[in-house]
Image (cartoon, helix red, strand yellow):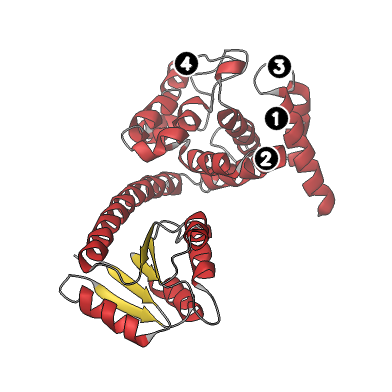
Amino acid sequence: MAKPRVLIVDDNPVNVELLKAQLKPYPYAIETAFDGEEALKKIHDTMPDLVLLDLMMPKVSGYEVCRAIKQNKETQFIPVIVITALSELDDKLKAIELGADDFLVKPFNKLELTTRIKSLLNLKALHDDVDRSENILFSLVKALEAKDVYTRGHSERVALMGVQLARHLGVEEKEIEVLRKGALLHDIGKIGVKEEVLLKPGRLTEEEMKHIQIHPSVGFDICKPLKSLAPCLCCVRSHHERIDGEGYPDHLTDKDIPLIAKIIAVVDGYDAMVTDRPYRKKMPKEDAIKIFEKEKKSGQWDLTLVEAFLMMIRSKNEKK
């Protein structure tokens, strides 16, 4: 098992050597940086598991380093312990507001330092385990789609368009990230659908249609054990619901279908129309737009979302 990587960032070599000496007995791979600029480069290149960060440094301050770490999706879960001689409350509050996970004032107690490092590394390890589990599911979706030339890249396109529509509607970024993950996983349940049904070139029988309609429930059951995906489950389970209650698997009506699931339903329908499927050739985008116009009040999709989506699509087409 690889040693946890700890990055010490301080412009004072004496302080760096002191921290290295105190951490030497522990199973950590220690790296050092002597200013904020060097720290950011090392964080980008080696992705440490924890950063011990001084605040007052030349070139790029510790505040800026902390901000950069916590605002980047790839590094935001790296724990940051701020170690500084500053004792003013305002300085501490500023570091905490920027996302620092802990705060130690020099001179610090060695046991306190090592205990806090161990605790934060344990939390980081738990997050990494969750991250790996999520990535396995995302990889499973890609592997599933790769087997079918007709749906290759479908989930990524749905995720991209879903995010664009959500931003167009002014949905909060936190909710948009939930939508993105849910869209990537929305068809994972097709792993439980027979290939001869999934790839059938002709019209499905009633029995085959019922079989393919199990995929939202199967996907829900696959993702449910991973607690980090709990907010995304509605996307997986409810992307084939209709606002008139005629969808599946739960026959939810308008008010009971979460907004992000409604968004995915719209963009999923559009992508299905404009790409080849086993049972039909893709249609021109203009024809898909006409179908949406015609079906706006059919009860399948949320009327407000359809209008916003059509506005977004037309705007894109005009810019080309």
147 with respect to 130 (left or right): right
Is residue 96 at all visible to an observer of this figure?
A: yes
Q: Specify the label residue 305 is tagged with.
A: 1
Q: Mark 2 is on which residue type? A: Leu
Q: CA distance from mark 4 to mark 2?
A: 25 Å
Q: CA distance from mark 3 to mark 4?
A: 19 Å
Please name the residue that numbered disc 4 is placed on: 250
Please name the residue that numbered disc 2 is placed on: 165
Please name the residue that numbered disc 3 is placed on: 298
Q: How many marks on residues?
A: 4
- Counting residues from the start of the chain, the first of labels 3 and 4 encountered is 4
Q: Secondary structure at mark 1?
A: helix
Label 3: few (<14), some (14–19) or many (≥20) C-alpha neighbours in 10 Å: some
Of 64 and 181, nearer the camera is 64
Is residue 77 positioned above or below 269 on the image? below
- Counting residues from the start of the chain, the first of labels 1 and 2 encountered is 2
- Counting residues from the start of the chain, the first of labels 1 and 4 encountered is 4
